[in-house]
Image (spheres, rainbow, N blue to C red):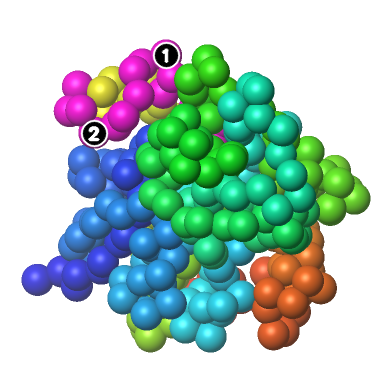
Amino acid sequence: MNKKISVAHSPDADDIFMYMAIKFGWVGNAYEYENTALDIQTLNELALENIYDVSAISFALYPLISSEYALLKTAVSFGEGYGPKLIKKKDKKLKPNFKVALSGAHTTNALIFRIKYPQARIVYKNFLEIEKAVLEDEVDAGVLIHESILEFDSSLCVEAELWDIWQELAKDDLPLPLGGMALRRSLPLNDAIAVEKDLIKAVEVADHNRKILASMLLERNLIRVDAQKLDVYLNLYANKNSINMNDKQYNAIDKLFELGFNHGFYEKLIKSKDYLIPSEYEEFRNS
């Protein structure tokens, strides 16, 4: 019997798209992958409890779980000229202590928001409830993430793009690190290397078979958007740059960690490449 590996990801179009090559049996046969779909803040909270073998996380969470989880090189989502949006009603003027709805305390957008707006009063909600909270005046503003950024009520407007805030804070031309994957360190190293290779292959296969896989997701009602929005969303967050991280992406993650450390969100400063799975072990062993 194949070893079981638990994989947790969000129900959002990009995560589902990047995982489903495994679910459909196109990739990997050495392990029995069991997947669970949960919203990103729940995934972050469960990662703090060391629940799943592999989990999607917000990059901003990683320094808090680095002793228990390795950072994976694949299935990543970065913003490049785009990202979460701070929205409000068009006639609303925001005071320094405005009340805002965010999608979770450990999300990347929350970290960037808290650095930029230290006086704001924050409430945390499931990201699907944030637009409604703004429309009903429960909050003055809200940060939209995932597919919510593609379309929202016409009475609302964008107060600020998190991408612009990121560029201001990072002071460099770096992509915005949003979501990644982490693997539990208690897995034997051989398994960790093999699982990461399966996930890399799954994202690569998904990207190379984009139209086929997108059609399958739509036919099975596995996603919340229509075909047109799915195509736009996947181009943003599940693309060739999601397959295997490059140096610019690592530098962006390190900048995020540096900002968090400098503003007191982390106890120590870490570098992303120091926390990857040492895949060179396999090459050394086989040499």
Q: Nearer the viewer, residue 217 or 61?
A: 61
Q: Residue at x 61, y 75 (%)?
A: 63
Q: Position of residue 176 (x, y in %)?
A: 69, 46
Q: Nearer the viewer, residue 155 or 68?
A: 155
What amino acid is found at the position of numbered circle 2 in the picture? Leu
Q: Is residue 75 above or below residue 5?
A: above
Q: Is residue 18 magenta?
A: no
> 100 left or right of 195?
right
Q: Residue at x 31, y 71 (%)?
A: 52
Upstream in the sequence, badge 1 or badge 2?
2
Q: Is residue 257 above or below residue 209?
A: below
- Indicate the quadrant containing the N terminus: top left, top right, bottom left or bottom right: bottom left
What amino acid is found at the position of numbered circle 1 in the picture? Gln
Q: Position of residue 166 (x, y in %)?
A: 77, 47
> 225 left or right of 235?
left
Q: Residue at x 19, y 70 (%)?
A: 4
Q: Residue under circle 2?
A: 222
Q: Is residue 229 above or below residue 3?
A: above
- Indicate the quadrant containing the C terminus: top left, top right, bottom left or bottom right: bottom right
Q: Position of residue 240 (x, y in %)?
A: 57, 36
Secondary-structure class at tag 2:
loop
Which segment did they paint magenta? 219-241
Secondary-structure class at tag 1:
helix
> 221 left or right of 155?
left
Q: Residues within 10 Å of mark 1 (few under 14, many from 20)?
A: few
Q: CA distance from mark 1 to mark 2?
A: 15 Å
Q: Which mark is residue 228?
A: 1
Q: Nearer the viewer, residue 285 or 14?
A: 14
Answer whether labels 1 and 2 touch (C-beta < 8 Å). no
